[in-house]
Amino acid sequence: MYLTIELLSLPLYGLASIKSRSLLSTEAGLKYFILGAFSSGVFLFGVSLLYFSTGSLSFSEIGQLAPAFSLSDTGLATLPSESSRLCICNGYVYGTCRSSFQINSGSISHVSS
């Protein structure tokens, strides 16, 4: 999933800054690239926390361990699991510009069009 999002983002960085003579278009491309780098870092941090808490990256093994990390537990053992879920979701949302609280995604689409 990570590689798919990153390969999808590469041509979009170029499309955001396709008007090379316009400073606003270049700024939009740079903003989008920095936003993508930030979201990629958050996503990978979440994946590393998921590996830390479960010991595996296999969906089937994580699914078997998921009932052990319930929200009703308040111990420190569930902290990496909950943090990984939060980081993975935030990295995906920022990477695909699906959140409404992003200031830069609106300026990127407005300037590059």
Image (tube, rainbow, N blue to C red):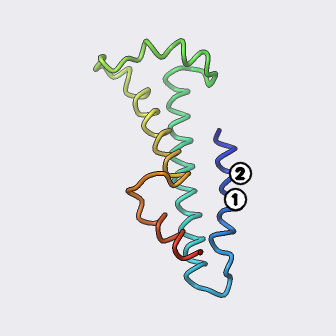
The Cα atoms of the two marked residues, 1 and 2, are separated by 6 Å
Residue 93 locus on image (x, y percent): 49, 47
Q: To which quarter of the image does residue 61 belong?
A: top right
User: Is 102 on the left or on the right of 59, as rendered?
Assistant: left
- Amino acid residing under circle 2: Leu
Q: Residue furthest bottom?
A: 21
User: Is 6 on the left or on the right of 81, as rendered?
Assistant: right
Residue at point 60%, 71% (across, down): 29
Q: Which residue is mark 2?
A: 7
Relative depth, front residue between 70 and 53: 70
Contact (CB < 8 A) between labels 1 and 2? yes
Q: Which residue is mark 1?
A: 10
What is the number of the mark on residue 74?
none
Residue 40 locus on image (x, y percent): 57, 49
Q: Residues within 10 Å of mark 1 (few under 14, many from 20)?
A: few
As helix, strand or loop, the secondary structure at mark 2 comes to: helix
As helix, strand or loop, the secondary structure at mark 1 comes to: helix
- Amino acid residing under circle 1: Leu
